[in-house]
Amino acid sequence: QAPHTIRLAVIPGDGIGKEVVPEGLKVLDAALAGTGASIERTDFDLGAERWHATGDTLTDEDLAAIKEHDAILLGAVGDPSVPSGVLERGLLLRLRFELDHYVNLRPAKHYPGVPTPLTEPGDIDFVVVREGTEGLYCGNGGAVRVGTPHEIATEVSVNTAYGVERVVRYAFEQANARRQRLTLVHKHNVLVHAGHLWRRTVEAVGAEYPGVSVDYCHVDAATIYMVTDPARFDVIVTDNLFGDILTDEAGAITGGIGLAASGNINPDRAFPSMFEPVHGSAPDIAGQGIADPTATILAVALLLEHIGEPDAAARVSAAVDADMATRARANQEGGPLTRSTSEIGDAIAQALRA
Ligand code: NAI
Ligand code: MG
């Protein structure tokens, strides 16, 4: 492969974000060694410290600079010293909206031997394609007479034909490349306006993918199947709120937050896509060097896939598979491995170089 440079914007953020991101970068370097690709990275000091120092969450200058990159690796943002919502909305959601990350891709996979609350987990390996720019999260709402008995609060779910079609199309492409099963999750028996737009869109786009079988679940039933028969799912496509909730459940059944990765993707490539662990800044364990960097490392695999390095992505996934097998063996042979954040990163990076 010809030598080329990947411009990477790095936002470690707060708490354990600062601890797991270096491990992700370590693995990224190891995965690209010898491929001709190299990383040119820019660090952005966004997060709680910057907000305390300057009052900025994400300035227009930051945003313009970030847009000059091929991809973004984010740790996590949020800190108990900053009012809830300031960084989450002002930084994270602003990036997702400004960079038109209309696909929020969240794989869920159960690794053999990882403790799960399910007694018979079956073969859990699905991806949730969550719409990322519309629905209830787009900020269409307001409040009047706040704090009085006559307070009115609205949050309106916005669903456009354009917005639904582009994410549904992406989901069909994913299904086509996987096990050819797509499940639409909504609630069109009650949410008839948005629900039927989603249903009709899936029917119309599905006609172009005769090889993909299409299923539908109301979201409440989907939460049941996710614990009783998660192996039924291959690709789930759903709106912003349902996707947020279902992917937390998916994280729980697959054995935890330290393993769940996510991509905020602009498939049109008009703007850089952003890859991150699903978890937050974990103030309860920050500073101890015990956070599991695996979710971030799996986010790096998604990043590599997106920027056109599928071989490197596959090698990262394989190295994580092998590391998970090592953990499972240790569990069986007497006790869980106790490794620091950087020891896990080192082990996976070393496996890649071997
Ligand atoms: P959290 O995901 O940070 O932590 C929840 C629990 O999981 C904690 O007990 C934590 O110790 C544990 N945990 C999380 N990641 C782990 C890892 N890699 N290894 C081992 N254990 C891990 O969620 P929480 O506590 O609700 O939120 C903390 C802050 O993070 C808040 O400010 C929240 O708004 C923010 N947040 C940010 C996100 C982001 O940047 N994408 C996503 C979720 C929350
Ligand atoms: Mg969430």
Image (tube, rainbow, N blue to C red):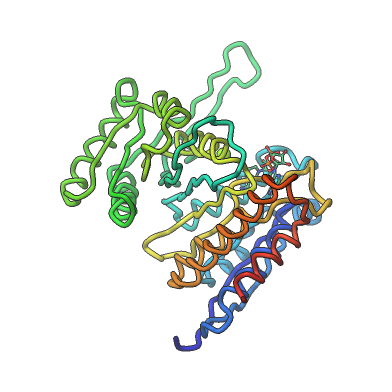
The residue under the point 62% across, 43% down is 257
Residue extending furthest toward the front: 333
Task: Name the image quarter holding residue 331.
Answer: top right
Q: Is residue 41 above or below residue 56?
A: below
Q: Is residue 43 left or right of residue 206?
A: right
Q: Name the spot of residue 76 as percent of width and height, x first.
A: 66, 51
Q: Does residue 191 appear in the picture of this structure? A: yes
Residue extending furthest toward the bottom: 2
The residue under the point 45% across, 50% down is 105
Residue extending furthest toward the right: 288
Q: Quadrant of the N terminus?
A: bottom left
Q: Is residue 260 above or below residue 85?
A: below
Task: Name the image quarter holding residue 296.
Answer: bottom right
Figure disc tally: 0
Q: Name the spot of residue 282 as percent of width and height, x first.
A: 73, 44
Q: Is residue 148 above or below residue 75?
A: above
Q: Is residue 131 above or below residue 339?
A: above
Q: Name the spot of residue 62 as percent of width and height, x first.
A: 62, 64
Q: Quadrant of ligand 1?
A: top right
Q: Quadrant of the C terminus?
A: bottom right
Q: Is residue 250 left or right of residue 48?
A: left
Q: Does residue 15 appear in the picture of this structure? A: no
Q: Name the spot of residue 287 as percent of width and height, x first.
A: 83, 52
The residue under the point 69% across, 65% down is 347
Looking at the picture, tell me which residue is in the foreground, 340 or 89.
340
The residue under the point 47% across, 41% down is 138
